[in-house]
């Protein structure tokens, strides 16, 4: 087990280095010269050369990469060309909003996917219709869900807000930056319910697609488990079908659904970027969208590194969890 | 040295073999039959769009923001362009782009998988470690970074998605090829003196085709959605071009009063993704065993 964890950690570090290398290469491919962008058009050749030397751009590529990695390890994500602030500071400001939305969407995806997988594993009349309905939900682009959700729940019914994270005037600036958690910590229930209302629509829009994928994998894994000998034994003991399914089959079928959840986190990051634009959610996605037209590559590199690292780490943790749940995997 | 090539076992002849269970059109559910039909129709539609679109996609056809069914099926947008024609052109772009990316993914991934699987040893090791590294990074996020680095345009978006889309296929083809390489008839072929390249192309590659086709057909729907999302983020062709994602994004300010401007392109994406997902399921049943 220890060996498996160590191996997995080594693989994770290797992948993170590849991620950094990819971003590093992309940075060199950008048409905008960072030195020119920083000094402006009137800079003399000597000034540019001096600045290049100061920033280490005249060193060999490999040395530059080593410097780059060293900077990353110290939390240096370079300066944003648009906001003229360190990218790390910008991300620190926008990250909590995105984190809260992603976590909420993840809960939605897991709960909805789990329910759906279990419900569809049993065959019943109309399961064909259900299949088309679920496939439609999986085929809907998240921005369409968002747009229809706003039309229905905001415009028609007026139940849910359509923009932003909060409509309360003085929100607590708490330790975590997650409004629901900070609200609870400060005992401000109004903030919590308000933040929750703002979360529901965007969270659902981000979570529904992944929920469908998780549900489909869980379903096929359940269907396989239900054919095994031990399930037949459980049935032969005279247990009710629901008990067989929920108590005996589900636990052994969770593995593939769990790895699917890990993979879906990557798609959810992309979904969050889109959804934040629709709901004017002040997170990393909005930051990305504002950075793209200004060709602010350091900002986008920072976003890619943070989200990419998050994805890689989440998947490594899930692998280890799976090995802990089913020791056969570590062999 | 004119040794006859060894007989290729029937199972390897894939769906064209005589001994293999015949897959029949009628064994596929009605929904899937309709979907496969619709997919063929969409492809034809994408080809002939310029001749059947009722109006221009980029020039105004009437007054701005006309409601749907008041002379224009999907209404008109903020500058009076026919939304239906724009959605038609958008479907064409999305569909052809998705096919192009899938084809390149299958080609690049297939080639790398074939080389890795057929060569084995350190070549296999190196190629697969690279593939694994790419597979463990979040594709869509990486694609955004690539487009941002190259500058937003449709061709850059396609290049970006191609870069992140091949590893999956490399893995599948390599797995199939490795499994085949261990079979006795491959050893027979090797003993008969079949060269490496011919062995890979003639004897290993055909075995990997069914799995690849099934995977690719199930994958098109995802790709359509990913491309639409990137286009929504502004990573596609610039302003007047009719792209479904970008149309929805630019229509957002009109959502509350003129809902059809952002909704109709979104429905276009839904239609395309749903048809490809259903047809993918159908093709899986048709081609069989996986």
Image (tube, rainbow, N blue to C red):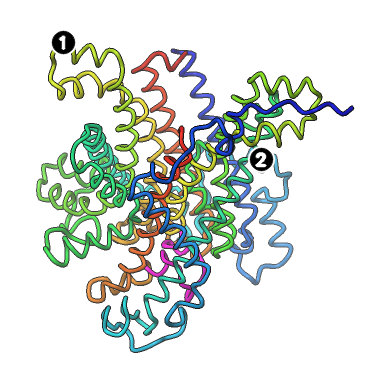
Q: Is residue B39 left or right of residue B181?
A: left
Q: Is residue B81 left or right of residue B49?
A: left
- Residue range corresponding to the magenta coloring: B230-248
Circle 2 — which element? helix
- Label 2 to label 1: alpha-carbon separation: 53 Å
Residue A310: name its quadrant. Answer: top left
Q: Disc 2 marks which residue?
A: B111
Camera-side residue of B72 and B204: B204
Camera-side residue of B119 and A292: B119
Looking at the image, which residue is at 33% across and 59% down? A143
Q: Is residue B237 magenta?
A: yes
Residue B137, above or below B35? above
Image spot of residue B191 (x, y percent): 78, 20
Q: Is residue A326 magenta?
A: no
Image spot of residue A329 (x, y percent): 43, 17
Which residue lies most toward the right here? B1
Q: Disc 1 marks which residue?
A: A237
Camera-side residue of B40 and B11: B11
Camera-side residue of A18 and B7: B7
- Label 1 chain ID: A
Looking at the image, which residue is at 14% across and 53% down? A194
């Amino acid at each position: 087990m220890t060996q498996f964890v160590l191996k997995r950690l080594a693989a994770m570090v290797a992948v993170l280095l590849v991620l950094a290398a990819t971003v590093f290469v992309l940075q060199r491919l950008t048409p905008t010269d960072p030195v020119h962008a920083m000094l402006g058009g009137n800079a003399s050749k000597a000034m540019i050369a001096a600045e290049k030397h100061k920033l280490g751009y005249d060193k060999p590529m490999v040395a530059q990469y080593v410097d780059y990695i060293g900077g990353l390890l110290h939390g240096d994500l370079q300066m944003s060309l648009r906001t003229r602030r360190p990218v790390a500071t910008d991300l620190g400001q926008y990250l909590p909003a995105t984190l809260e939305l992603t976590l909420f969407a993840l809960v939605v995806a897991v709960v909805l996917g789990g329910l759906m997988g279990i419900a569809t594993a049993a065959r019943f009349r109309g399961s064909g219709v259900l299949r088309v309905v679920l496939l439609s939900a999986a085929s809907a682009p998240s921005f369409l869900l968002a747009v229809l959700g706003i039309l229905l729940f905001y415009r028609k019914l007026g139940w849910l807000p359509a923009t932003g994270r909060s409509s309360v005037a003085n929100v607590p600036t708490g330790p975590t930056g997650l409004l629901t958690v900070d609200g609870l910590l400060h005992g401000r229930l109004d903030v919590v319910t308000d933040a929750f209302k703002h979360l529901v629509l965007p969270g659902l829009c981000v979570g529904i697609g992944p929920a469908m994928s998780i549900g489909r994998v869980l379903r096929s894994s359940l269907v396989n488990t239900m054919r095994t000998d031990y399930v037949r034994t459980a049935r032969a003991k005279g247990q009710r079908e629901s008990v067989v399914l929920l108590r005996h089959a589900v636990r052994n079928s969770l593995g593939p659904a769990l790895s699917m959840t890990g993979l879906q986190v990557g798609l959810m990051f992309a979904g969050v970027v889109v959804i934040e634009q629709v709901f004017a959610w002040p997170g990393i996605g909005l930051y990305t969208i504002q950075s793209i037209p200004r060709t602010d590559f350091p900002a986008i590199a920072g976003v890619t590194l943070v989200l990419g690292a998050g994805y890689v780490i989440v998947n490594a943790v899930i692998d280890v969890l799976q090995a802990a749940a089913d020791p056969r995997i570590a062999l | 040295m004119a040794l006859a090539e060894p007989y290729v076992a029937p199972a390897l002849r894939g769906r064209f073999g005589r001994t293999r269970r015949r897959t029949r059109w009628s064994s596929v559910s009605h929904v899937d039959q309709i979907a496969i039909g619709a997919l063929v129709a969409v492809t034809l539609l994408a080809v002939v769009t310029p001749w059947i679109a009722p109006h221009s996609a980029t020039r105004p056809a009437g007054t701005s923001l006309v409601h749907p069914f008041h002379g224009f099926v999907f209404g008109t947008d903020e500058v009076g362009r026919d939304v239906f024609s724009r959605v038609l052109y958008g479907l064409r772009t999305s569909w052809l782009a998705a096919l192009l990316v899938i084809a390149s993914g299958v080609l690049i991934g297939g080639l790398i998988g074939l080389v890795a699987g057929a060569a084995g040893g350190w070549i296999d090791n190196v190629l697969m470690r690279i593939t694994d590294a790419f597979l463990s990074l979040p594709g869509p996020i990486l694609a955004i970074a690539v487009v941002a680095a190259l500058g937003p345009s449709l061709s850059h978006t396609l290049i970006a998605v191609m870069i992140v889309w091949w590893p999956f296929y490399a893995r599948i083809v390599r797995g199939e090829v490795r499994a085949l390489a261990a079979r006795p008839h491959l050893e027979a072929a090797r003993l008969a003196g079949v060269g490496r390249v011919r062995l890979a192309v003639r004897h290993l590659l055909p075995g990997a085709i069914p799995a690849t086709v099934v995977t690719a057909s199930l994958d098109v729907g995802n790709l359509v959605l990913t491309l639409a999302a990137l286009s929504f983020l502004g990573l596609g062709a610039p302003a007047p071009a009719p792209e479904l994602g970008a149309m929805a994004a630019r229509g957002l300010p009109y959502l509350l009063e003129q809902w059809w401007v952002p909704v109709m392109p979104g429905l276009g994406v839904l239609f395309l993704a749903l048809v490809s997902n259903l047809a993918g399921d159908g093709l899986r049943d048709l081609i069989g065993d996986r």
